[in-house]
Image: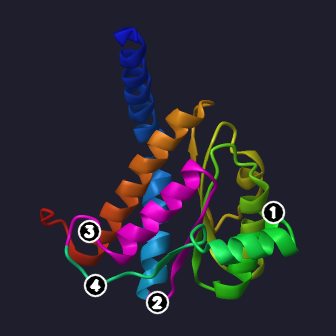
């Protein structure tokens, strides 16, 4: 394969990350504050997405329950993408569009956070999960790309929108991962201060 094509991937990704750093630093900071306040009050973070975004939701939950870069007590994070019995039962008996919203209705409480990840902002099951979260007086951190789609239009002033300014799914997901790691680091700093990570 032409190495120039490979180099172009790295170049485009690096340029988008630098552009996004300026645009997204403030909403990422707001997401950290929102999640820290919720976790400090005994609430939890639920996370959902499809495909690569499902992987990101699981990655984030794993960093909360396990650790990011510092040894600490587990934080309550649940990926709504992992219970195949729930997903297949709800998908079969109701609709694939309800696989996350049913879980938000079951597990979500006022004060909890929903991390809703959709590169298009239009994933029907993620949109339904956000609707369910807002009905339950949860706050939402939405990670999207492109123009933010339906998710961007649904959010209230109390929610946070991390919108990557790009149309290519792979590039959006790469920035989402940096945003997730930034949130995890921010939570560690909020818990323990600015000391170097172990």
Label 4, label 2: how many angstroms apart (C-alpha)? 15 Å
The disc, 1 or 4, on the residue closer to the chain's N-terminal end is: 4
Q: Which residue is mark 3?
A: 189
Q: Are marks 4 and 2 in contact (CB under 8 Å)?
A: no
What x and y, as percent, mark residue 21? Answer: 40, 40
Q: Nearer the viewer, residue 177 or 191?
A: 177
Q: Nearer the viewer, residue 68 or 190?
A: 68
> Taking 58 as reference, is 190 above or below it?
below
What x and y, as percent, mark residue 170? Answer: 53, 35
Q: Quadrant of residue 15?
A: top left
Q: Which residue is mark 4?
A: 73
> Taking 12 as reference, is 19 above or below it?
below
Discs 4/2, front: 4
Q: Which residue is mark 2?
A: 41
Mark 3 neighbour class, 10 Å CA radius: few under 14, some 14 to 19, many 20 or more? some
Q: Tell whether position 63 is magenta.
A: yes
Q: Please report the residue visible at 41 percent of the width from the left and 35 percent of the height from the top.
A: 17
Q: Which residues are magenta?
A: 41-70
What x and y, as percent, mark residue 67? Answer: 29, 71
Label 2, label 3: how many angstroms apart (C-alpha)? 17 Å
The disc, 4 or 3, on the residue closer to the chain's N-terminal end is: 4
What x and y, as percent, mark residue 99? Answer: 74, 69
SS assignment at label 2: loop
């Amino acid at each position: 394969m032409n190495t120039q094509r490979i180099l172009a991937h790295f170049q485009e990704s690096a340029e988008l990350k630098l552009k996004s750093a300026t645009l997204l630093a403030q909403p990422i900071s707001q997401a950290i504050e929102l999640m820290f306040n919720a976790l400090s009050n005994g609430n939890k973070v639920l996370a959902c997405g499809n495909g690569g975004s499902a992987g990101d939701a699981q990655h984030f939950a794993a960093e909360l329950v396990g650790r990011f870069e510092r040894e600490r007590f587990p934080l309550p994070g649940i990926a709504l993408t992992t219970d195949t019995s729930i997903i297949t039962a709800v998908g079969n008996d109701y609709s694939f569009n309800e696989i996350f919203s049913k879980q938000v209705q079951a597990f979500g409480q006022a004060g909890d956070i929903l991390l809703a990840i959709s590169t298009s902002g239009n994933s029907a099951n993620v949109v339904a999960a956000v609707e369910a979260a807002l009905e339950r007086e949860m706050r939402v951190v939405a990670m999207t790309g492109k123009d933010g789609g339906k998710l961007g239009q649904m959010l209230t002033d109390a929610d946070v929108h991390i919108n990557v300014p790009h149309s290519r799914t792979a590039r959006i997901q790469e920035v989402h991962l940096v945003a997730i790691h930034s949130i995890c680091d921010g939570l560690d700093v909020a818990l323990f201060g600015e000391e170097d990570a172990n």
